[in-house]
Image: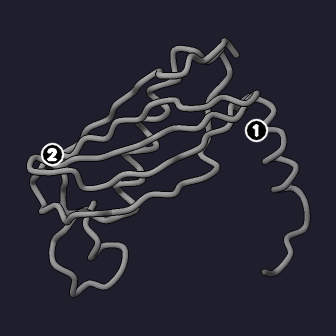
Amino acid sequence: MQDIPLGAKGSFAMLVGPSHLASQFKDNILPPVFATPMMVLIMENAALNAVRQYLDPGESAVGTKVDVTHMAATPVGHRVRAEAEVVGVAGRQIQFRVAAWDETEQIGAGTHERMIVDIERLGKRLAGKQAAPSRRV
């Protein structure tokens, strides 16, 4: 892992389609509006894009914490965009300020954290978990 500078920024944009709507995730009687889990997705992608250039081969950064407010509804067919800025780095843990907009207004804001992981090591951990007997939850 390379040093990640405070202030590093990333963005991510997408067009809101039928599979991104709240009615697909929750109550099907909801109007056709952009779902909060999808807003979190674009914020997480923006955060990953902010640090991608600082990752070594075989590394990625996985989400570990999200604290956001979804402030406004976005209709299907609108373009949405998220931006993330690195505001803290502590070892492999990275803190971001995140925000999202549609074509009209800001739709969300908050904070997000990601942890840098070694993909091979994570794969081995997952393989061990898969091989272990499952426990009911």
Identify the residue at horizontal 69%, vertical 35% (top origin). 93
- Quarter holding the C terminus is bottom right
Viewer-nearest residue: 87 or 44: 87
Does 19 sit left or right of 45 as displayed?
left
Does 121 sit left or right of 17 as displayed?
right
Does 95 sit left or right of 121 as displayed?
left
Amino acid type of disc 1?
Answer: Gly
Identify the residue at horizontal 49%, vertical 32% (top origin). 48
Identify the residue at horizontal 86%, vertical 75% (top origin). 135
Q: Is residue 11 above or below residue 137?
A: above
Amino acid type of disc 2?
Answer: Arg
Q: Comparing marks 2 and 1, which lies closer to the viewer?
A: 2
Q: Which of marks 2 and 1 is nearer the N terminus?
A: 2
- Quarter holding the N terminus is top right
Q: Name the residue under label 2.
A: 79
Q: Mark 1 points at which residue?
A: 123
Could you say whether the residue bearing mark 1 is in a helix, strand or loop? helix
